[in-house]
């Protein structure tokens, strides 16, 4: 019940998960055989009060790390290309936070008007700064953390919130044609692996995980730290919302066009969802640009067809187009 649990049912709560420490034995408990049992710790806090306090704390700190937010209207192609390019280049001096699942939840909260907008903007600010602090050890010479928003279905809701929270940071809007976005979205539907089939690794090479706040695995091998890092990466990947969902299930209904639903009714349902998500993402971007004189919204715009070599530039020769494609990447 509410009394025994000590929680207010009218409040939205945030779960914070702290991974096992791989360096400090004091944070681990010993087993009967002398092995170290490493445990995940979970803390539940009220969303708005905690993140308001966290945002105020980050506001008082001076940071040299820049943030960059990549919004999507390409069925997730931009996030995949960016992630692969940065990995291939050894990180390029930046850290990447790829499509965090909490952004999907924030989008749903915003769409349902469950939290006042000013409080939600502060929550976005606090969560993004917290994510940047989490990956601080992976930030190189460029001193930049790149966030890729989770798909075109969340862009209409998240883009205005994130820009309001970070008006002076870098913003990139990556888009593709409607045809290419639909084709990729349908491909994702056919090739995606269901979350129920994912097997998360144990830390330290031990057995499967236990219940709430249980230790996961154990052992004293030299590779324990590497195993723990790999497990954390796998957990993060498993908790991401699948791209076939974030490309084809629009959170925000498109309201700026009349009778568009009648046109979409002629399409198969899977194609219609992708088209609506793509249109809503493009519409949100154009609406912000239309108010540029008042909101100073001046993002970088990335045309994925140009980067992928599918779209040329006027009368340029083929070798010149290829050269510019490589430069853009």
Image (cartoon, grey):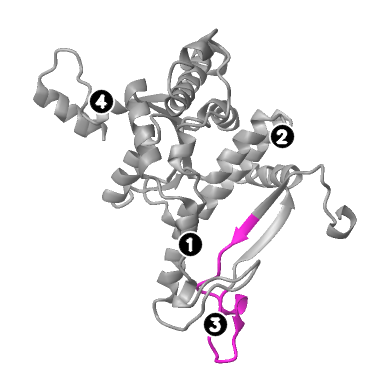
Which of the two discs, 2 and 1, labels the residue nearer the N terminus?
Answer: 2
- The reply to whether the magenta stretch includes residue 20 is yes
Q: Which mark is residue 232?
A: 1
Estimate the x, y position of residue 1 in percent, counting from the top left: 86, 55
Q: Which residues are magenta?
A: 16-38
Look at discs 2 and 1 and give the one toward the viewer: 1
Q: Residue at x 42, y 82 (%)?
A: 221
Label 3 close to label 2 by CB (< 8 Å) = no
Label 4 close to label 1 by CB (< 8 Å) = no
Which of the two discs, 2 and 4, labels the residue nearer the N terminus?
Answer: 2
Estimate the x, y position of residue 23 in percent, counting from the top left: 51, 74
Secondary element under disc 4, as helix, strand or loop, is helix
Q: Is residue 104 above or below residue 315?
A: below
Q: Residues within 10 Å of mark 2 (few under 14, many from 20)?
A: some
Which of the two discs, 3 and 4, labels the residue nearer the N terminus?
Answer: 3
Label 3 close to label 4 by CB (< 8 Å) = no
Left or right placement of residue 219 versus residue 253 in this view: left
Secondary element under disc 1, as helix, strand or loop, is helix
Can you identify the residue that label 3 sits on?
A: 36
Q: Residue at x 71, y 34 (%)?
A: 119
- Residue 236 visible in the current orientation: no
Toward the top, the furthest residue is: 258
Which of the two discs, 4 and 1, labels the residue nearer the N terminus?
Answer: 1
How far is mark 3 from mark 2, CA to CA? 41 Å
- The reply to whether the magenta stretch includes residue 186 is no
User: In terms of depth relative to the viewer, which is nearer, 298 or 162?
Assistant: 162
Can you identify the residue that label 2 sits on?
A: 119
- Residue 242 visible in the current orientation: yes
Q: Residues within 10 Å of mark 4 (few under 14, many from 20)?
A: some
Left or right placement of residue 177 versus residue 168 in this view: left
Q: Residue at x 53, y 32 (%)?
A: 154
């Amino acid at each position: 019940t509410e009394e025994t649990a000590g929680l207010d049912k009218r409040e939205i709560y945030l779960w914070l998960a702290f991974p096992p420490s791989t360096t400090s034995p004091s944070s681990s408990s010993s087993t009967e055989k002398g092995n170290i049992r490493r445990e995940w710790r979970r803390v539940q806090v009220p969303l708005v009060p905690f993140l308001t306090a966290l945002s105020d704390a980050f506001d008082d700190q001076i940071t040299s790390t820049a943030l960059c937010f990549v919004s999507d209207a390409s069925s997730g192609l931009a996030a995949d290309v960016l992630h692969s390019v940065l990995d291939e280049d050894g990180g390029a001096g930046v850290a990447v936070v790829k499509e965090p699942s909490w952004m999907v939840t924030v989008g749903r909260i915003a769409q349902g008007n469950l939290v006042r907008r000013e409080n939600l903007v502060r929550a976005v600010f606090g969560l993004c700064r917290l994510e940047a602090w989490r990956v601080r050890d992976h930030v190189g010479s460029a001193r930049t953390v790149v966030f890729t928003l989770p798909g075109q279905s969340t862009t209409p809701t998240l883009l205005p919130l994130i820009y309001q929270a970070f008006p002076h940071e870098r913003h990139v809007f990556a888009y593709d044609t409607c045809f290419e976005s639909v084709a990729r979205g349908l491909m994702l539907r056919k090739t995606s692996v269901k979350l129920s089939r994912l097997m998360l690794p144990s830390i330290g090479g031990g057995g499967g995980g236990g219940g709430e706040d249980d230790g996961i695995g154990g052992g004293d091998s030299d590779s324990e730290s590497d195993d723990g890092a790999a497990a954390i990466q796998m957990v993060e990947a498993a908790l991401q919302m699948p791209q076939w969902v974030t490309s084809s299930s629009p959170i925000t209904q498109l309201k700026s066009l009349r009778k568009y639903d009648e046109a979409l009714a002629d399409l198969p349902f899977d194609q219609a969802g992708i088209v609506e998500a793509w249109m809503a993402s493009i519409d949100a971007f154009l609406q912000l640009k239309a108010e540029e004189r008042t909101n100073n919204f001046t993002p970088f715009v990335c045309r994925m067809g140009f980067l992928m070599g599918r779209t040329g530039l006027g009368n340029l020769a083929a070798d010149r187009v290829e050269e510019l494609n490589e430069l853009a990447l």
